Amino acid sequence: MFKNRKDAGNNLAFALDFYKGKNVLVLAIPRGGVEVGYQVAKHLGTDFSILISRKLPYPDNPEAGFGAVAEDGSTILLEDASLWIPDEEIKEIISHQIHEIRRRIKVLRKGKPLPEITGRTVILVDDGLAMGSTMRAAIELCRKKKAKKIVVAVPVAGGRIARELDKIVDETVILEVPRFFQAVAQVYLNWYDVSDEKVLNILEKWEKQQHHSKG
C-alpha cells in the first residue's frame, strides 16, 4: 500500500534510479500522474512536463472508456467500440475531449508546447493503469515524435495491461501488479481527485526549483 501519490512517486523514483542524471524527460499524465511524476523528476534530476491524454468515455457510463486521445490527436480505440457506439457519436466524443485537452494545455501548461521528445528517453508516468488507454495514446504520441526510448513507469497496474504494455514499449517499471485488481485506488490509503489547482501548484513549485537551481 502507498500512503498517497507522493509516497508512490518516491517509491517509483527509487525504482528508476538507473536514469539519474541521464538527460531523460519525465512526462506525467494529468491530473493524477502529476504528483507522482514530480517526485520522480525531482529525484532523478530530469526535465519534467505534462503530456495530456484523455479517456473517451462511454455516453451512458462516463466512468468507463472505449479508448483515449492524446494532445497531438493520436487516438486509441477498443476494437469493438464502433459496435456499441455509432461512428458519428465517436467523432463527437473525440472532438469534445480534444476541446478539453486544449483547455488543459492553456490552463495547466500555460499554453506552452511539449518539450522536445525526438531522440530522447521519455519516462511516461501516471498514478496507475486500469484500462491503460490514456497511456497507450501517450505512447503513440511519443512514437510519432520519434522518442529514442519509451519507458512506462507507474505505481500499480492490472496484470493484463502490464503484460500488453511490456510488449509495446522499451521498458516498464510497475511496482504493484495485484492479483485481484479492481481499481488503481485499491493500493492507496489516501485516494482523492486531483484538481487543476493542485496540478498548477506542483508545476509552479517545479518552475521555482528550476529557477532557483539555475540561479
Image (cartoon, rainbow, N blue to C red):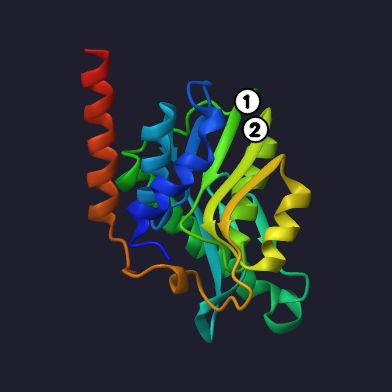
- Mark 2: which secondary structure? loop
* Residue at 49 percent of width and 61 percent of height: 97
Circle count = 2
Instruction: List the residue tagged with mark 1.
Output: 118
Instruction: Residue type at mark 2: give it.
Output: Lys
Instruction: List the residue tagged with mark 2.
Output: 145
Residue 38 lies left or right of residue 207; in this view the side is right
Quote the CA–CA distance across marks 1 and 2. Answer: 6 Å
Give the x, y percent position of residue 193.
Answer: 32, 67
Give the x, y percent position of residue 68.
Answer: 59, 61
- Mark 1: which secondary structure? loop
Instruction: Residue type at mark 1: give it.
Output: Thr
Quadrant that contains the C terminus: top left
The answer to whether residue 34 is visible is yes
Give the x, y percent position of residue 150.
Answer: 65, 38
Q: Relative to 83, does residue 206 appear above or below in the rendering?
A: above
